[in-house]
């Protein structure tokens, strides 16, 4: 089939490459001229494992091309995907400016039957509005259909996720469009959820909100574990083995971040208030999430004191998760900002997100290092902020030699506490006791460790 993909970002570029790999003839379209020039010359604008190879292979075999011209890009397409960004607006709702603008352009240039597919994450009733905008902008009477087809892939494993998705959701109002979607996704074996627009739109938000809820839930269990003397990783393992619960999204840490969860949870909450419904659970999910990073900073402050101006902190990880260069709403970046705000000098390393972070954080009081070990040189403590695999495998002897004092704040529970403590480190994880001491509110464990245990 001939397919056009509008918006060649983290979703659109991967989608375009995967559709081409399934045998479709695909044109990727973007308003960002630099991005299109880069991709066309074989350079990827983002880091995503396997993407470069897949894009290049399909450009070479003639199934994938790119343009900045929407009219030219959609001309021969039977299916047109809208994959533009829907960032968080000031009131928490999704900002749909790019979706409306693309719908208008599609309407102006439509000259034959096409299925317009909204893949961007959009609130309920958006697909209906897209249909209306296209109709209002048609130059000649043209039959077309709109389909809602939300995407569930995860950055860092996008290609694999899209090729082996758990389900394909199709919100539609015409059998003709449904059949086109079935043909397009013929290579996928997963169940097809056929439904109305609003349910399809809600499935996406409800899924992300539920996953965010799991994260906040395990983070609260972690808070309880630190106070009660339990280990949240053991608790999560024990819970996750129950098939009704499952092991995923039960990792206590610094909370969720990234380009989807924060904005999608906020947008769903806004939808609920717009519908005069107070979604209390979601409000708590967001509150708990914010609390996790403050709590992490509180640990560091309790250990070193409130003023960190004479401290250097080594921070490993900048991207919002491993295997991506995406730092949108990255909790790691936020933690670094907070530490710098307390006066700390930061030495930082991330395998893929250094360029994006330099643009975001600048260079004031931050030294961007060539590798993890360089970041640790003469630092007062090590903070583990993103769960890159290489940070799990650090050579502890080397780490101890490089740091000024052997202190580790592990925001992602990457290390084995027993091993690290045996190696002579003071080790703070999330949701487990430190050096056998149970967290007490009036005199936190970290203060006890710094000053020595309280004399009875
Ligand atoms: P992105 O910012 O990486 O990409 C959006 C692209 O759209 C950019 O390249 C931008 O230049 C382009 N664009 C904007 N306006 C345009 C226009 N008028 N014409 C042509 N191109 C235009 O965003 P993303 O992360 O790919 O997300 C896209 C959508 O997919 C969002 O709604 C997001 O919520 C959803 N989504 C993202 C993920 C993810 O992991 N990133 C997962 C599932 C769903």
Image (cartoon, helix red, strand yellow):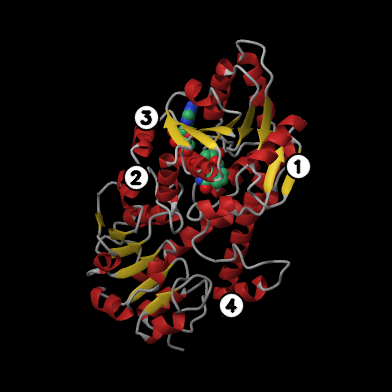
Q: Of the numbered discs in the image, which one, if any, rests on residue 360?
A: 2
Check disc 2 and report its element: helix, strand or loop. helix
The span from disc 3 to disc 4 (Cα, nearest Å) is: 50 Å
The residue that mark 4 highlights is 234
The residue that mark 1 highlights is 194
- Classify 10 Å Cα crowding around label 3: few (below 14), some (14-19), many (20 and above): few
Discs 4, 1 touching: Cβ within 8 Å: no
The span from disc 2 to disc 4 (Cα, nearest Å) is: 36 Å
Q: Where is residue 275 in the image (x, y as percent from the top left)?
A: 73, 36
Q: Of the numbered discs in the image, which one, if any, rests on residue 228?
A: none
Check disc 3 and report its element: helix, strand or loop. helix
Q: Is residue 276 left or right of residue 382?
A: right
The residue that mark 3 highlights is 33
Q: Position of residue 144 (x, y in %)?
A: 67, 23
Discs 2, 4 touching: Cβ within 8 Å: no
Q: In which quarter of the image is residue 30?
A: top left
- Classify 10 Å Cα crowding around label 4: few (below 14), some (14-19), many (20 and above): few
Q: In which quarter of the image is residue 49?
A: bottom left
The answer to whether one can see residue 10 in this image is yes
Q: Nearer the viewer, mark 3 or mark 2?
A: 3
């Amino acid at each position: 089939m001939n397919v056009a993909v509008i918006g060649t970002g983290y979703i659109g570029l991967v989608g375009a490459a995967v559709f081409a790999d399934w045998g479709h003839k695909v044109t990727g379209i973007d308003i960002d001229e630099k991005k299109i020039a880069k991709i066309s010359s074989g350079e990827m604008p983002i880091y995503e494992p396997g993407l470069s190879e897949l894009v290049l292979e399909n450009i070479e075999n003639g199934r994938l091309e790119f343009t900045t011209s929407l009219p030219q890009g959609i001309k021969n397409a039977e299916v047109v995907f809208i994959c533009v960004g829907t960032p968080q607006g000031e009131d928490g709702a999704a900002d749909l400016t790019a979706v409306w603008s693309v719908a208008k352009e599609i309407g102006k240039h439509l000259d034959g039957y096409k299925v317009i597919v909204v893949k961007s994450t959009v609130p309920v009733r958006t697909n209906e509005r897209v249909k209306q905008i296209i109709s209002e902008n048609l130059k000649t009477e043209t039959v077309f259909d709109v389909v809602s087809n939300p995407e569930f892939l995860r950055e860092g494993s996008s290609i694999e996720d899209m090729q082996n998705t758990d389900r394909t959701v199709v919100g539609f109002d015409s059998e003709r469009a449904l059949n086109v979607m079935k043909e397009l996704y013929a290579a996928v074996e997963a169940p097809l959820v056929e439904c109305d627009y609003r349910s399809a739109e809600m499935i996406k938000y409800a899924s992300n909100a539920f996953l965010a809820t799991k994260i906040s839930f395990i983070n609260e269990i972690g808070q309880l574990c630190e106070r009660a003397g339990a280990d949240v990783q053991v608790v999560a393992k024990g819970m996750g083995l129950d098939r009704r619960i499952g092991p995923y999204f039960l990792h206590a840490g610094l909370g969720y971040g990234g380009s989807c969860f924060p904005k999608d949870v906020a947008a769903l909450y806004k939808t609920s208030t717009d519908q005069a419904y107070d979604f209390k659970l979601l409000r708590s999910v967001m509150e708990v999430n914010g609390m996790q990073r403050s709590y992490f900073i509180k640990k560091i402050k309790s250990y070193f004191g409130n003023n960190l101006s004479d401290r250097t902190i080594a921070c490993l990880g900048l991207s919002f998760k491993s295997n991506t260069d995406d730092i949108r709403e990255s909790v790691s970046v936020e933690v670094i900002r907070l530490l710098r705000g307390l006066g700390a000098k930061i030495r930082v390393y991330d395998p893929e997100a250094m360029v994006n972070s330099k643009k975001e954080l600048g260079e004031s009081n931050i030294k961007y290092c060539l590798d993890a070990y360089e970041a640790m040189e003469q630092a007062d403590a090590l903070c583990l902020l993103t769960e890159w695999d290489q940070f799990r495998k650090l050579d502890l002897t080397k780490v101890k030699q490089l740091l000024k004092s052997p202190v580790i704040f592990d925001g992602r529970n990457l290390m084995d506490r027993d091993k690290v403590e045996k190696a002579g480190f003071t080790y703070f994880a999330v949701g487990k006791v430190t050096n056998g001491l149970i967290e007490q509110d009036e005199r936190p464990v970290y203060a006890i460790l710094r000053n020595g245990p309280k004399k009875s």
